Amino acid sequence: MKEKSLVLYKQSPALIKSRESDKITITLEKGEKKVRLKDIVLLHEGPLSSLGALEILEGDPQEAWELFQGETPSLKDLAELIYGDFTPSAAWSVFLLLNRTAWFRGTVEEIEVTSAEEREKRESAEREKEEAAGRWADFLTRLKKEEFREEDEPWLREVEQMALGRIKRSAVLSELKREQTPENAHKLLLKWGRVDSRWNPHPARFDCKTGNPDIAVPLLPEEERSDLTGFTSYAIDDEGNTDPDDAVGWDGERLWVHIADAAALVTPDSPLDFEARDRGANLYIPEKTVTMLPPAVTDQLGMGLQPDRSPGFSFGILMDEEGSVADVDIRLSWVKVERLSYAQADTMMEQEPFKTIAALLGKTRQRRKDNGAREISLPEVKIRVEDEGRGEILIKPLPRLESREMVAESMMLAGNAAASFAIAHAIPVPFVSQPTPENNPQKLEGPAGEFAKRKIMQRSRVTLSPSKHSGLGLDVYTRVTSPLRRYSDLMTMQQLRAFITGGTVRNEEEMLEGTTACESLASQVTAAERASNQHWKINYLLERPDWVGEAILVDKTDKLGVFLIPELAMEPRIALRDVRDYNTVVRVKVQSADLPERRVVFAYDE
């Protein structure tokens, strides 16, 4: 190599300016650079006056490609045959034929002639690439006008996949210089009319399955069960509930909590078990319920769904005068169950057995309070959208009913009994605990006081080591009463059932694996439910542009207040202005709403 020789540096042409020992100064299109000999490749000895004098020559490589089939020609051989002479421009032009066209491939030092088959493949790929580029250019023209054709469907689906959180980047969003977020993709779909405001992308965004499992369900096996049909038990749920998995009853001596015997059909490591683990929990969104288990499981096991008797996994709890658990009898059972709504049951609370059950549970509730239980009373609502998202949006308050509190107390008692039984017999189960708050809440009354109590609560934890659940005021606790709709409950039931029937109990390592998997998925389900509820609340407000409602100041900083809107169970932040006293009630209206961002700005109704 000498001065004014043409060389290749990082696939770009360069001109040797000078050479000093092992350092070579080269001239590039954008200045000079010192490089080592091994960093460059000689294309032509030159002399080449300047890079500006370098041309890309026109020539037909067909003859050279045919002549050199099966050989390894040099750069000089190809230049002379294709361009008639070996000049710096001819050398550069031959280099541009390598790897970038279908004729030749390889390196400057070792050139390969492609076969006819490979050339056809590469030319076909190049044609497809050019055609795709043309289609993309045509699409961009229509994109600016927002006038789409059928052939634009792949790019529009890409935006939809982005909105659903299934891909991380969209070429369309890049072209429109939009930030690569599902929310921005959602906004485009709304703008283009690809979806309407009721389209709910959130379950898919959190990777939740949106269809019920379709797996074969076995029949209930023949097993010995205790006959507890001599007294009626009651499955009490919200109106319209389709998966009744618990019931309460009183036999004159013991309080019975019956659980749908899900583990009778869903055995560990069976296809049904893996499917349930893969879902984590039922998905309850306003437009529908997506079940963790096939509906056929609930049809066989749901409390009160069979005409004569239901198969149960029953806890018979004997309590002393102070409300302490004196004994727990756990067994497989047949139970007679009547289904009631909370509203129906609430009208029967002065009748037996509800009067006795409520009196007994009043004592256990007081014991929990004495043990630090924190009861929080903030408005809750139930959101339902009729006709699977196409009908009316209904938002109804959940009233605090005595019957609801009775059922909740029964389920907590069963969870405490199940945890105590597991500890006593060294059965690994997922225990639920909650640390004691580090600070005391502000001493406030009313909704502001309830908000303050909730604000300091720490997240519950699920581990294989039992410890106190401070929020419930229980020394030990596990979830067991919802095995048809929550996998952690199903795992606990599988363990207890295996123990009392002489089966194989999973070890800690197996339980840890299952617990870790299902808790992660259950968190995703919860997040999808919350996002979906917010989605439908915003739709509710968008469809009622004149909506005005009451809001209560429950928390504040210097300039912003947190206001509770009981009618919607929403807690927006609004500028305080002259509103300073906790529990002050004001009238608010919607100032703006952003559905994709799930954000509503409220203002005072003045």
Image: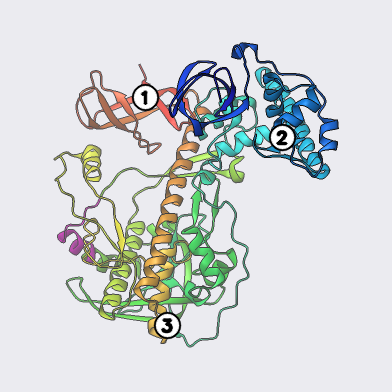
Measured in 3D between alpha carbons, the distance from the residue under mark 1 to the one under mark 2, in whole angstroms, is 81 Å
Amino acid at circle 3: Thr
Asked if the residues shown at circle 3 and circle 1 are in contact, with their CB atoms under 8 angstroms apart, the answer is: no
Measured in 3D between alpha carbons, the distance from the residue under mark 3 to the one under mark 1, in whole angstroms, is 59 Å
**Secondary structure of the residue carrying numbered label 3:** loop
- Left or right: where 386 falls relative to 488: right
Measured in 3D between alpha carbons, the distance from the residue under mark 2 to the one under mark 3, in whole angstroms, is 74 Å
Amino acid at circle 1: Val
Badge 3 or badge 1: first in the primary sequence: 3
Quarter placement of the N terminus: top right
Q: Which residue is identified by label 2?
A: 74
Q: Which residue is identified by label 3?
A: 504
What's the mark number on residue 335? none
Asked if the residues shown at circle 1 and circle 2 are in contact, with their CB atoms under 8 angstroms apart, the answer is: no
- Left or right: where 318 falls relative to 72: left
Crowd around label 2: few <14 · some 14–19 · many ≥20 (10 Å): some
**Where are the magenta residues, as a range?**
364-375
- Residue 155 drawn above or below residue 590: below
